[in-house]
Amino acid sequence: MYIVTAKEMYDIDHFAMTEIGLDGKLLMENAGRAVADRVTAIVKDTDKICVLAGSGNNGGDGFVIARTLLDKGYAVQVLQVVANDKILGDAYYHKRLFERCGGIISLFDGKCTSMITSNNVIIDAIIGIGSKGILREPLASLVHYINREAKKVISVDIPSGLPADEGKGEFISIQADYTFVIGAPKVSAFLNHTSPYYGKWEPVSIGLPSRAFKTNTSRFVWGIDDVRNSLPDRKPDDHKGELGKGLVIGGSKEMPGALAMSLKASLRAGAGLITGATTEGVIRMLSANCIEATYKELSETNGFLDNRTDVSLEGYHAVAIGMGMGRRTCTGDLVRSLVHTAECPIVIDADGLYHIKEDLLDIENRRYPTVITPHPGEMAMLLGITVNELLLEPFRYSREFAIKNNSYVVLKGMITIITSPEGEQVVNMSGNPGLAKGGSGDVLTGIILAMIMQGQMIFQALCNACYIHGRSADELISEKHSYHDLLASDVIDGLAKVFRIIS
Protein backbone atom coordinates (compact mmCIF):
# COMPACT_ATOMS: atom_id res chain seq x y z
CA MET A 1 0.00 0.00 0.00
CA TYR A 2 1.53 3.27 -1.14
CA ILE A 3 1.41 6.58 0.76
CA VAL A 4 1.13 9.80 -1.23
CA THR A 5 1.24 13.56 -0.95
CA ALA A 6 -1.44 15.66 -2.65
CA LYS A 7 0.88 16.42 -5.56
CA GLU A 8 1.85 12.78 -5.95
CA MET A 9 -1.83 11.79 -6.07
CA TYR A 10 -2.51 14.38 -8.75
CA ASP A 11 0.51 13.10 -10.69
CA ILE A 12 -0.72 9.51 -10.36
CA ASP A 13 -4.16 10.47 -11.69
CA HIS A 14 -2.56 12.42 -14.54
CA PHE A 15 -0.27 9.50 -15.38
CA ALA A 16 -3.22 7.09 -15.42
CA MET A 17 -5.20 9.32 -17.76
CA THR A 18 -2.47 10.53 -20.13
CA GLU A 19 0.02 7.66 -20.18
CA ILE A 20 -2.34 4.73 -19.61
CA GLY A 21 -5.44 6.21 -21.23
CA LEU A 22 -7.97 5.81 -18.40
CA ASP A 23 -10.84 8.28 -18.74
CA GLY A 24 -11.43 10.67 -15.85
CA LYS A 25 -15.18 9.99 -15.84
CA LEU A 26 -14.46 6.26 -15.48
CA LEU A 27 -12.09 6.80 -12.55
CA MET A 28 -14.71 8.99 -10.87
CA GLU A 29 -17.36 6.33 -11.44
CA ASN A 30 -15.05 3.67 -10.00
CA ALA A 31 -14.28 5.81 -6.96
CA GLY A 32 -17.89 6.63 -6.19
CA ARG A 33 -19.07 3.04 -6.61
CA ALA A 34 -16.24 1.67 -4.47
CA VAL A 35 -17.06 4.09 -1.65
CA ALA A 36 -20.80 3.43 -1.96
CA ASP A 37 -20.16 -0.29 -1.53
CA ARG A 38 -18.25 0.41 1.69
CA VAL A 39 -20.99 2.77 2.90
CA THR A 40 -23.68 0.11 2.56
CA ALA A 41 -21.69 -2.09 4.95
CA ILE A 42 -21.86 0.44 7.80
CA VAL A 43 -25.31 2.05 7.36
CA LYS A 44 -28.82 0.65 7.77
CA ASP A 45 -31.45 0.35 5.06
CA THR A 46 -33.58 2.75 7.05
CA ASP A 47 -30.90 5.43 7.41
CA LYS A 48 -31.43 8.77 5.72
CA ILE A 49 -28.30 9.97 3.94
CA CYS A 50 -27.16 13.44 2.96
CA VAL A 51 -24.19 13.79 0.60
CA LEU A 52 -22.34 17.12 0.84
CA ALA A 53 -20.87 17.77 -2.60
CA GLY A 54 -18.30 20.42 -3.44
CA SER A 55 -16.49 21.21 -6.66
CA GLY A 56 -13.72 19.17 -8.25
CA ASN A 57 -13.14 15.44 -8.12
CA ASN A 58 -14.29 15.03 -4.52
CA GLY A 59 -17.68 16.54 -5.31
CA GLY A 60 -17.90 14.42 -8.47
CA ASP A 61 -17.26 11.31 -6.36
CA GLY A 62 -20.09 12.48 -4.11
CA PHE A 63 -22.56 12.62 -6.99
CA VAL A 64 -21.63 9.08 -8.02
CA ILE A 65 -22.00 7.87 -4.42
CA ALA A 66 -25.42 9.52 -4.17
CA ARG A 67 -26.61 7.98 -7.48
CA THR A 68 -25.32 4.53 -6.54
CA LEU A 69 -27.00 4.60 -3.12
CA LEU A 70 -30.21 5.94 -4.67
CA ASP A 71 -30.24 3.02 -7.12
CA LYS A 72 -29.82 0.64 -4.16
CA GLY A 73 -32.96 2.02 -2.56
CA TYR A 74 -31.49 4.31 0.10
CA ALA A 75 -33.08 7.63 1.01
CA VAL A 76 -30.45 10.01 -0.37
CA GLN A 77 -30.30 13.72 -1.02
CA VAL A 78 -27.42 15.99 -2.01
CA LEU A 79 -26.52 19.31 -0.48
CA GLN A 80 -24.31 21.13 -2.99
CA VAL A 81 -22.08 23.51 -1.05
CA VAL A 82 -20.76 25.55 -4.02
CA ALA A 83 -22.47 27.55 -6.72
CA ASN A 84 -23.63 25.77 -9.88
CA ASP A 85 -20.95 27.40 -12.02
CA LYS A 86 -18.26 25.76 -9.87
CA ILE A 87 -19.31 22.25 -10.89
CA LEU A 88 -17.35 21.57 -14.06
CA GLY A 89 -15.97 18.78 -16.23
CA ASP A 90 -16.31 15.22 -14.98
CA ALA A 91 -18.04 16.36 -11.79
CA TYR A 92 -20.73 18.17 -13.84
CA TYR A 93 -21.21 15.02 -15.97
CA HIS A 94 -21.91 12.93 -12.88
CA LYS A 95 -24.10 15.61 -11.34
CA ARG A 96 -26.32 15.49 -14.42
CA LEU A 97 -26.49 11.68 -14.25
CA PHE A 98 -27.64 11.90 -10.64
CA GLU A 99 -30.38 14.37 -11.54
CA ARG A 100 -31.54 12.26 -14.49
CA CYS A 101 -31.87 9.29 -12.15
CA GLY A 102 -34.30 11.27 -10.03
CA GLY A 103 -31.82 12.64 -7.52
CA ILE A 104 -32.64 15.81 -5.58
CA ILE A 105 -29.99 18.52 -5.13
CA SER A 106 -30.32 21.43 -2.71
CA LEU A 107 -28.01 24.45 -2.76
CA PHE A 108 -26.28 25.48 0.44
CA ASP A 109 -27.33 29.03 1.27
CA GLY A 110 -24.44 29.80 3.58
CA LYS A 111 -26.32 29.05 6.75
CA CYS A 112 -26.30 25.93 8.90
CA THR A 113 -29.12 23.76 7.66
CA SER A 114 -31.52 21.29 9.16
CA MET A 115 -30.41 18.76 6.52
CA ILE A 116 -27.43 17.97 8.77
CA THR A 117 -29.60 16.99 11.72
CA SER A 118 -32.54 15.46 9.82
CA ASN A 119 -30.33 12.79 8.23
CA ASN A 120 -28.72 9.87 10.08
CA VAL A 121 -25.62 9.81 7.89
CA ILE A 122 -23.57 12.66 6.41
CA ILE A 123 -21.21 11.83 3.54
CA ASP A 124 -18.49 14.46 3.25
CA ALA A 125 -17.44 14.99 -0.38
CA ILE A 126 -16.76 18.71 -0.09
CA ILE A 127 -13.08 19.32 -0.80
CA GLY A 128 -10.80 16.27 -0.74
CA ILE A 129 -7.08 16.85 -1.19
CA GLY A 130 -7.64 20.24 -2.81
CA SER A 131 -7.83 22.10 0.49
CA LYS A 132 -5.55 25.15 0.50
CA GLY A 133 -5.10 26.99 3.78
CA ILE A 134 -7.64 27.23 6.59
CA LEU A 135 -11.28 26.93 5.54
CA ARG A 136 -13.06 30.24 5.11
CA GLU A 137 -16.69 31.12 5.69
CA PRO A 138 -19.28 29.86 5.10
CA LEU A 139 -17.64 26.42 4.93
CA ALA A 140 -15.83 26.89 8.26
CA SER A 141 -19.14 27.36 10.09
CA LEU A 142 -20.66 24.43 8.19
CA VAL A 143 -17.80 22.15 9.28
CA HIS A 144 -18.12 23.25 12.92
CA TYR A 145 -21.87 22.60 12.76
CA ILE A 146 -21.35 19.12 11.29
CA ASN A 147 -18.79 18.22 13.94
CA ARG A 148 -21.18 19.32 16.64
CA GLU A 149 -24.52 18.01 15.36
CA ALA A 150 -24.05 15.19 12.85
CA LYS A 151 -24.84 11.64 14.01
CA LYS A 152 -22.45 9.76 11.70
CA VAL A 153 -19.95 11.29 9.28
CA ILE A 154 -18.27 9.44 6.43
CA SER A 155 -15.55 11.30 4.51
CA VAL A 156 -14.56 10.58 0.93
CA ASP A 157 -10.77 10.29 0.46
CA ILE A 158 -9.89 12.73 3.25
CA PRO A 159 -11.92 14.76 5.76
CA SER A 160 -12.68 18.13 4.20
CA GLY A 161 -10.40 20.91 5.42
CA LEU A 162 -7.71 18.49 6.59
CA PRO A 163 -4.31 18.97 4.91
CA ALA A 164 -3.18 15.97 2.87
CA ASP A 165 0.49 16.69 3.54
CA GLU A 166 2.66 17.20 6.61
CA GLY A 167 3.84 20.56 7.88
CA LYS A 168 0.49 22.22 8.56
CA GLY A 169 -0.50 22.66 12.16
CA GLU A 170 -3.56 24.92 11.86
CA PHE A 171 -6.72 23.85 10.05
CA ILE A 172 -10.48 23.51 10.37
CA SER A 173 -11.53 19.98 9.45
CA ILE A 174 -14.42 17.58 9.39
CA GLN A 175 -14.11 15.05 12.21
CA ALA A 176 -15.03 11.83 10.42
CA ASP A 177 -16.19 8.58 11.95
CA TYR A 178 -15.06 6.75 8.81
CA THR A 179 -12.94 7.75 5.83
CA PHE A 180 -12.72 5.76 2.63
CA VAL A 181 -9.43 6.73 1.04
CA ILE A 182 -9.30 6.89 -2.75
CA GLY A 183 -6.37 5.08 -4.38
CA ALA A 184 -3.82 5.47 -1.58
CA PRO A 185 -3.69 6.98 1.92
CA LYS A 186 -2.33 10.49 2.19
CA VAL A 187 0.58 11.44 4.44
CA SER A 188 -1.70 13.10 7.00
CA ALA A 189 -3.26 9.71 7.82
CA PHE A 190 0.02 8.88 9.58
CA LEU A 191 0.63 12.06 11.61
CA ASN A 192 -0.17 12.38 15.30
CA HIS A 193 -2.12 15.62 14.98
CA THR A 194 -4.11 14.84 11.82
CA SER A 195 -4.74 11.09 11.84
CA PRO A 196 -7.53 11.24 14.48
CA TYR A 197 -9.69 13.27 12.07
CA TYR A 198 -9.92 10.30 9.70
CA GLY A 199 -11.71 8.09 12.23
CA LYS A 200 -11.51 4.50 11.00
CA TRP A 201 -10.07 4.51 7.51
CA GLU A 202 -9.43 2.07 4.72
CA PRO A 203 -8.30 2.49 1.10
CA VAL A 204 -10.49 1.66 -1.87
CA SER A 205 -9.13 0.71 -5.28
CA ILE A 206 -10.42 2.59 -8.32
CA GLY A 207 -8.39 0.85 -11.02
CA LEU A 208 -5.26 2.99 -10.95
CA PRO A 209 -2.37 0.88 -12.29
CA SER A 210 0.47 0.00 -9.92
CA ARG A 211 2.88 1.45 -12.48
CA ALA A 212 1.42 4.89 -11.81
CA PHE A 213 2.28 4.61 -8.10
CA LYS A 214 5.76 3.15 -8.64
CA THR A 215 6.58 6.03 -10.98
CA ASN A 216 5.45 8.78 -8.61
CA THR A 217 6.13 7.79 -4.98
CA SER A 218 8.70 5.94 -2.85
CA ARG A 219 6.65 5.80 0.34
CA PHE A 220 4.57 2.77 1.36
CA VAL A 221 3.15 0.68 4.20
CA TRP A 222 4.90 -2.56 5.17
CA GLY A 223 2.60 -5.49 5.85
CA ILE A 224 2.65 -9.21 6.50
CA ASP A 225 2.88 -10.09 2.79
CA ASP A 226 6.02 -7.97 2.53
CA VAL A 227 7.49 -9.82 5.51
CA ARG A 228 6.68 -13.20 4.01
CA ASN A 229 8.21 -12.21 0.68
CA SER A 230 11.48 -10.93 2.16
CA LEU A 231 12.20 -12.91 5.34
CA PRO A 232 14.71 -15.67 4.47
CA ASP A 233 13.74 -19.28 5.11
CA ARG A 234 15.89 -21.41 7.35
CA LYS A 235 17.78 -24.09 5.41
CA PRO A 236 18.37 -27.60 6.77
CA ASP A 237 22.14 -27.11 6.79
CA ASP A 238 22.15 -23.70 8.52
CA HIS A 239 24.35 -23.46 11.60
CA LYS A 240 24.67 -20.86 14.34
CA GLY A 241 27.70 -19.17 12.79
CA GLU A 242 25.74 -18.44 9.61
CA LEU A 243 22.72 -17.05 11.43
CA GLY A 244 24.50 -14.06 12.84
CA LYS A 245 27.08 -13.45 15.51
CA GLY A 246 26.05 -10.21 17.19
CA LEU A 247 27.47 -8.02 19.95
CA VAL A 248 25.23 -5.96 22.23
CA ILE A 249 27.04 -3.25 24.21
CA GLY A 250 25.19 -1.56 27.03
CA GLY A 251 23.90 -1.79 30.55
CA SER A 252 25.02 -0.06 33.72
CA LYS A 253 24.53 -0.46 37.45
CA GLU A 254 21.36 1.65 37.15
CA MET A 255 19.83 -0.05 34.10
CA PRO A 256 20.97 -3.65 33.71
CA GLY A 257 17.59 -4.86 32.41
CA ALA A 258 17.80 -2.90 29.14
CA LEU A 259 20.74 -5.02 28.01
CA ALA A 260 18.99 -8.23 29.07
CA MET A 261 15.91 -7.46 26.96
CA SER A 262 17.97 -6.71 23.86
CA LEU A 263 19.93 -9.94 24.30
CA LYS A 264 16.83 -12.10 24.78
CA ALA A 265 14.94 -10.43 21.93
CA SER A 266 17.82 -10.90 19.52
CA LEU A 267 18.10 -14.59 20.36
CA ARG A 268 14.33 -15.11 20.14
CA ALA A 269 14.29 -13.32 16.78
CA GLY A 270 16.73 -15.81 15.29
CA ALA A 271 20.30 -14.67 15.90
CA GLY A 272 22.74 -17.58 16.02
CA LEU A 273 25.17 -16.22 18.62
CA ILE A 274 24.78 -13.16 20.83
CA THR A 275 27.31 -11.67 23.24
CA GLY A 276 26.55 -9.05 25.84
CA ALA A 277 29.42 -6.63 26.46
CA THR A 278 29.02 -4.80 29.74
CA THR A 279 30.38 -4.30 33.25
CA GLU A 280 31.29 -7.15 35.54
CA GLY A 281 28.44 -6.27 37.91
CA VAL A 282 25.82 -6.37 35.15
CA ILE A 283 27.14 -9.72 33.92
CA ARG A 284 26.66 -11.14 37.41
CA MET A 285 23.06 -9.94 37.43
CA LEU A 286 22.16 -11.18 33.93
CA SER A 287 24.04 -14.39 33.33
CA ALA A 288 21.68 -16.59 35.37
CA ASN A 289 18.58 -15.23 33.61
CA CYS A 290 19.85 -15.07 30.03
CA ILE A 291 21.84 -18.27 29.82
CA GLU A 292 21.81 -18.59 26.01
CA ALA A 293 23.97 -15.47 25.61
CA THR A 294 27.70 -15.22 26.15
CA TYR A 295 29.32 -12.27 27.88
CA LYS A 296 32.32 -10.00 27.53
CA GLU A 297 33.49 -7.89 30.45
CA LEU A 298 34.40 -4.27 29.69
CA SER A 299 36.09 -1.70 31.87
CA GLU A 300 33.98 0.62 33.98
CA THR A 301 34.06 3.74 36.09
CA ASN A 302 31.75 3.62 39.11
CA GLY A 303 29.42 1.10 37.44
CA PHE A 304 29.34 2.76 34.00
CA LEU A 305 31.19 1.64 30.88
CA ASP A 306 34.29 3.61 29.90
CA ASN A 307 36.78 3.58 27.06
CA ARG A 308 39.77 1.96 28.79
CA THR A 309 39.10 -1.46 27.28
CA ASP A 310 40.13 -2.20 23.71
CA VAL A 311 36.84 -3.65 22.43
CA SER A 312 37.60 -6.06 19.61
CA LEU A 313 34.78 -6.41 17.06
CA GLU A 314 36.55 -9.03 15.00
CA GLY A 315 34.25 -11.88 14.01
CA TYR A 316 31.00 -10.07 14.76
CA HIS A 317 28.50 -9.56 11.95
CA ALA A 318 26.76 -6.56 13.59
CA VAL A 319 26.80 -4.50 16.79
CA ALA A 320 24.04 -2.82 18.81
CA ILE A 321 25.02 -0.16 21.31
CA GLY A 322 23.40 2.21 23.78
CA MET A 323 20.73 0.36 25.76
CA GLY A 324 20.84 1.24 29.47
CA MET A 325 24.44 2.48 29.37
CA GLY A 326 23.79 5.93 30.82
CA ARG A 327 25.09 9.34 29.78
CA ARG A 328 28.40 9.60 31.61
CA THR A 329 31.27 11.28 29.74
CA CYS A 330 33.43 8.18 30.00
CA THR A 331 30.69 6.11 28.35
CA GLY A 332 30.36 8.62 25.54
CA ASP A 333 34.03 8.17 24.72
CA LEU A 334 33.41 4.44 24.26
CA VAL A 335 30.39 4.95 22.00
CA ARG A 336 32.11 7.43 19.73
CA SER A 337 35.20 5.24 19.47
CA LEU A 338 33.18 2.22 18.41
CA VAL A 339 31.09 4.18 15.91
CA HIS A 340 34.31 5.46 14.38
CA THR A 341 36.06 2.08 14.16
CA ALA A 342 33.34 -0.58 13.69
CA GLU A 343 33.75 -2.33 10.34
CA CYS A 344 30.28 -3.89 10.37
CA PRO A 345 26.67 -2.68 10.61
CA ILE A 346 25.99 -0.86 13.87
CA VAL A 347 22.64 -0.14 15.53
CA ILE A 348 22.60 2.89 17.86
CA ASP A 349 19.78 3.25 20.36
CA ALA A 350 18.82 5.00 23.58
CA ASP A 351 21.78 6.59 25.41
CA GLY A 352 24.00 5.80 22.44
CA LEU A 353 22.08 8.45 20.48
CA TYR A 354 22.80 11.03 23.16
CA HIS A 355 26.52 10.32 22.89
CA ILE A 356 26.70 10.77 19.10
CA LYS A 357 24.73 13.99 18.81
CA GLU A 358 27.87 16.16 18.61
CA ASP A 359 29.71 13.78 16.26
CA LEU A 360 27.28 13.04 13.46
CA LEU A 361 30.08 13.49 10.94
CA ASP A 362 31.45 10.12 12.12
CA ILE A 363 28.18 8.50 11.03
CA GLU A 364 28.12 10.33 7.70
CA ASN A 365 31.64 9.11 6.88
CA ARG A 366 31.14 5.47 7.89
CA ARG A 367 31.68 2.89 5.12
CA TYR A 368 29.41 0.36 6.82
CA PRO A 369 25.65 0.61 7.46
CA THR A 370 24.52 2.69 10.44
CA VAL A 371 21.05 2.34 11.94
CA ILE A 372 19.63 4.77 14.49
CA THR A 373 16.40 3.97 16.36
CA PRO A 374 15.20 7.18 18.08
CA HIS A 375 11.84 7.97 19.61
CA PRO A 376 10.59 11.51 18.82
CA GLY A 377 12.39 13.09 21.79
CA GLU A 378 15.73 11.57 20.76
CA MET A 379 15.24 12.49 17.11
CA ALA A 380 14.41 16.08 18.04
CA MET A 381 17.58 16.16 20.15
CA LEU A 382 19.71 15.00 17.20
CA LEU A 383 18.13 17.61 14.93
CA GLY A 384 18.21 20.47 17.44
CA ILE A 385 14.47 21.12 17.14
CA THR A 386 11.43 20.68 19.38
CA VAL A 387 9.38 17.49 19.48
CA ASN A 388 6.36 19.43 18.19
CA GLU A 389 8.34 20.61 15.18
CA LEU A 390 9.42 17.05 14.46
CA LEU A 391 5.94 15.58 14.76
CA LEU A 392 4.60 18.19 12.36
CA GLU A 393 6.92 16.89 9.60
CA PRO A 394 8.34 13.49 10.61
CA PHE A 395 8.65 12.21 7.04
CA ARG A 396 10.64 15.21 5.88
CA TYR A 397 12.94 15.36 8.89
CA SER A 398 13.63 11.62 8.83
CA ARG A 399 14.38 11.66 5.12
CA GLU A 400 16.67 14.67 5.29
CA PHE A 401 18.59 13.21 8.24
CA ALA A 402 18.97 9.79 6.61
CA ILE A 403 20.28 11.21 3.35
CA LYS A 404 22.58 13.80 4.93
CA ASN A 405 24.06 11.38 7.47
CA ASN A 406 24.17 8.30 5.23
CA SER A 407 22.16 6.30 7.75
CA TYR A 408 19.02 4.27 8.24
CA VAL A 409 16.50 5.95 10.54
CA VAL A 410 13.86 4.03 12.48
CA LEU A 411 11.69 6.80 13.96
CA LYS A 412 9.53 5.12 16.59
CA GLY A 413 6.13 6.39 17.62
CA MET A 414 2.39 5.92 17.17
CA ILE A 415 3.42 4.67 13.76
CA THR A 416 7.04 3.90 12.91
CA ILE A 417 8.75 5.50 9.91
CA ILE A 418 11.73 3.63 8.49
CA THR A 419 13.96 5.61 6.10
CA SER A 420 16.91 4.47 3.99
CA PRO A 421 20.02 6.55 3.16
CA GLU A 422 18.57 6.90 -0.34
CA GLY A 423 15.36 8.45 1.00
CA GLU A 424 12.99 5.50 0.55
CA GLN A 425 10.41 5.42 3.33
CA VAL A 426 8.20 2.75 4.85
CA VAL A 427 5.52 3.02 7.51
CA ASN A 428 4.91 0.19 9.96
CA MET A 429 1.41 0.15 11.42
CA SER A 430 1.62 -2.93 13.63
CA GLY A 431 1.75 -2.33 17.36
CA ASN A 432 -0.52 -0.68 19.91
CA PRO A 433 -0.47 1.51 23.05
CA GLY A 434 0.67 -1.45 25.14
CA LEU A 435 4.15 -0.81 23.76
CA ALA A 436 4.31 2.50 25.60
CA LYS A 437 6.38 0.90 28.36
CA GLY A 438 10.01 0.99 29.36
CA GLY A 439 11.99 -1.69 27.59
CA SER A 440 9.93 -1.84 24.39
CA GLY A 441 12.63 0.00 22.45
CA ASP A 442 15.33 -2.31 23.84
CA VAL A 443 13.35 -5.30 22.57
CA LEU A 444 13.00 -3.72 19.12
CA THR A 445 16.75 -3.08 18.96
CA GLY A 446 17.43 -6.73 19.73
CA ILE A 447 15.06 -7.84 16.97
CA ILE A 448 16.68 -5.39 14.54
CA LEU A 449 20.12 -6.77 15.36
CA ALA A 450 18.93 -10.31 14.63
CA MET A 451 17.17 -9.32 11.40
CA ILE A 452 20.11 -7.48 9.84
CA MET A 453 22.20 -10.63 10.28
CA GLN A 454 19.67 -12.91 8.54
CA GLY A 455 20.66 -12.51 4.90
CA GLN A 456 18.25 -9.70 4.02
CA MET A 457 18.80 -6.27 2.58
CA ILE A 458 19.25 -3.88 5.53
CA PHE A 459 16.16 -1.85 4.69
CA GLN A 460 13.98 -4.96 4.45
CA ALA A 461 15.44 -6.26 7.70
CA LEU A 462 14.48 -3.05 9.52
CA CYS A 463 10.95 -3.13 8.12
CA ASN A 464 10.56 -6.78 9.08
CA ALA A 465 11.87 -6.17 12.59
CA CYS A 466 9.43 -3.33 13.21
CA TYR A 467 6.49 -5.32 11.88
CA ILE A 468 7.34 -8.44 13.90
CA HIS A 469 7.84 -6.39 17.08
CA GLY A 470 4.47 -4.64 16.72
CA ARG A 471 2.64 -7.77 15.60
CA SER A 472 3.78 -9.59 18.74
CA ALA A 473 2.17 -6.86 20.86
CA ASP A 474 -1.01 -7.02 18.74
CA GLU A 475 -1.34 -10.78 19.13
CA LEU A 476 -0.78 -10.56 22.88
CA ILE A 477 -3.42 -7.86 23.29
CA SER A 478 -5.93 -9.85 21.26
CA GLU A 479 -5.44 -12.97 23.36
CA LYS A 480 -4.54 -12.45 27.02
CA HIS A 481 -3.12 -9.02 27.77
CA SER A 482 -4.38 -5.44 27.93
CA TYR A 483 -2.72 -2.16 27.04
CA HIS A 484 -2.15 -1.63 30.77
CA ASP A 485 -0.41 -4.85 31.77
CA LEU A 486 1.64 -5.67 28.64
CA LEU A 487 5.39 -5.75 29.41
CA ALA A 488 8.38 -5.61 27.09
CA SER A 489 9.35 -9.11 28.22
CA ASP A 490 5.90 -10.33 27.15
CA VAL A 491 6.63 -9.06 23.63
CA ILE A 492 9.76 -11.23 23.53
CA ASP A 493 7.71 -14.27 24.53
CA GLY A 494 5.14 -13.42 21.85
CA LEU A 495 7.65 -13.56 19.01
CA ALA A 496 7.24 -17.33 18.68
CA LYS A 497 3.62 -17.02 17.59
CA VAL A 498 4.45 -14.25 15.10
CA PHE A 499 7.04 -16.39 13.39
CA ARG A 500 4.51 -19.23 13.19
CA ILE A 501 1.98 -16.86 11.61
CA ILE A 502 4.52 -15.62 9.08
CA SER A 503 5.61 -19.12 8.11
Image (cartoon, rainbow, N blue to C red):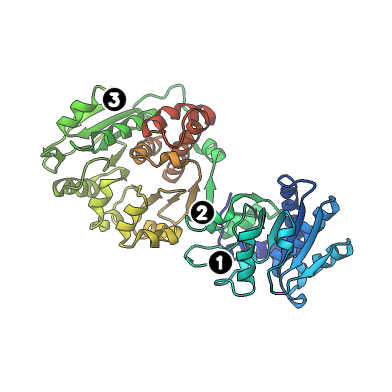
Q: Residue 46 or 323: which is nearer the viewer?
A: 46
Q: Position of residue 368 (x, y in %)?
A: 32, 48
- Choose mark 3 or mark 2, whichever is in front: 2
Q: Could one spot residue 22 in this view of the protein?
A: no
Residue 172 is labelled as 1
Q: Are marks 1 and 2 in contact (CB under 8 Å)?
A: no
Q: Position of residue 467 (x, y in %)?
A: 48, 40
Q: Position of residue 69 (x, y in %)?
A: 80, 53
Q: Please tell me whether mark 1 sits on a helix, a strand or a loop.
A: loop
Q: Please tell me whether mark 3 sits on a helix, a strand or a loop.
A: loop
Q: Amino acid at mark 1?
A: Ile
The residues tagged by marks 3 and 2 sit, at their Cα atoms, a distance apart of: 37 Å
The residue depicted at 28 percent of the width and 22 percent of the height is 291
Taking 227 as reference, is 486 left or right? left
Marked residue nearer the N-terminal end (3 or 2) = 2
The residues tagged by marks 1 and 3 sit, at their Cα atoms, a distance apart of: 53 Å
- For disc 3, the marked residue is 290
Look at the picture and state if 426 lies above or below 476: below
Marked residue nearer the N-terminal end (1 or 2) = 1
Q: Could one spot residue 407 in this view of the protein?
A: yes
Look at the picture and state if 36 lies above or below 258: below
Marked residue nearer the N-terminal end (1 or 3) = 1
Q: Quadrant of residue 58?
A: bottom right
Residue 190 is labelled as 2
Residue 32 is labelled as none
Q: Position of residue 317 (x, y in %)?
A: 32, 37
Q: Amino acid at mark 2?
A: Phe
Q: Residue 481 or 305: which is nearer the viewer?
A: 481
Q: Residue 307 or 93: which is nearer the viewer?
A: 93
Q: Quadrant of residue 189?
A: bottom right
